[in-house]
Amino acid sequence: MILELDCGNSFIKWRVIPVTGGVPLIQGIASQPVDIVQALLGQGLGKIPRCRLVSVRSDAETQVVMDVLSESLSLSVTKACPAERLAGVVNGYRDQQRLGLDRWLAIVAAYDMCREACLVIDLGTAITVDLVARDGTHLGGYIAPGVALLRGRLLAHTRRIQYDSEETALVLSDFSAGRSTAEAVDRGCLIMARSYVCSQITFAESYLGGDFVTYVTGGDAPLVADVREVKCVADLVFRGLALACP
C-alpha cells in the first residue's frame, strides 16, 4: 500500500492505494497531518511502508508534515520536486521553481494519459489553465479566481449582499436568473467560471489547433463537466504524483 498526499495551503487531500494502483482503499481531507495518522490507525489497514506527497506549502511546513507521518507511521516519505522534464513534458516556465507543483503534476498526468496536445484546467480556489503541445512542450497558461473566491470577494466588498451559506447548495442546479440574493450571486459566479472555461477552450485552438484533449480537475470540476466534451479526472494530481515518485 502507498499513502499519497496533496498538501494545499489550507487542507491536505490524502488517500491510500494498492501498490499496483487502482481504487483507493481509503481517502479523505485533513487540516493537519495528525488527523491523517489518527484516521489510518483507526482503520486497521496494517503496515503502510511508503508515502509520496506533493506540497505547495513552504519547505518548513512541508517538513513538519513529513516528520509527523514518518515518526507516527514508521514509513518512508518521498516528496515531488520541480523538474525541467518529466514523463515527456517540458516545463514551460522561465523559472521552473515558480510553477506550482500540483499544477505541474496535473499537466504531466494529463499528457501521459493522451500523448497528444491537451488543455489542462484545474478548478479550485483559483482556476489554472495550461496548454501542452503535441510534442509535450508546456506552452504556459493562465490563472484566474475560482468560484468560491469570486463569491467571497463580492460578498466582502458589497455590504448589502448577504445570505446564509446554507443557501448556496440549493441554487446551483440550474442557471436561470436568480430570484434571491443567493441565487443571483452563486449563479452569476458560476456562469462567469463556466464562460471562462469555454473561452479558454476556444482560445486554445489558436495555440493547439483544433485537435486537442481538454481535461478538468479540482473541487469545482463537476460544475463544468458538461462543457464541450471535457474529460473530468478527479485524481489528476495524484496520477502525476505517481509519475514523479514511482
Image: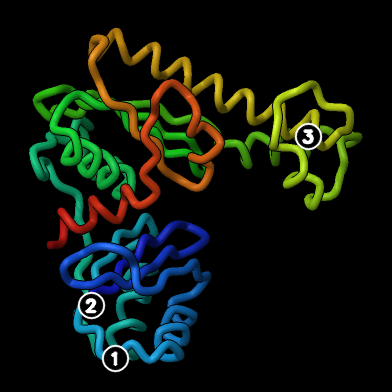
> What's the residue at 50%, 39% (across, down)?
126
Q: Amino acid at mark 3?
A: His
Question: How many C-alpha atoms fall within 10 Å of the one at disc 2: few (<14), some, or many (≥20)?
Answer: some
| 196 vs 33: above or below | above
Question: How many C-alpha atoms fall within 10 Å of the one at disc 1: few (<14), some, or many (≥20)?
Answer: few
Residue placed under numbered mark 1 in the picture: 46
Q: Quadrant of residue 153?
A: top right
Where is residue 215 shown, x and y percent of the image? 34, 34
> What's the residue at 52%, 60% (across, down)?
10
Q: Secondary structure at mark 1?
A: loop
Q: In the drawing, does residue 124 fall left or right of residue 22?
A: right
Residue placed under numbered mark 2 in the picture: 1
> What's the residue at 26%, 10% (across, down)?
210
Q: Earlier in the sequence, mark 3 or mark 2?
A: 2
Q: Nearer the viewer, mark 3 or mark 2?
A: 2
Question: How many C-alpha atoms fall within 10 Å of the one at disc 3: few (<14), some, or many (≥20)?
Answer: few
Residue placed under numbered mark 3 in the picture: 157
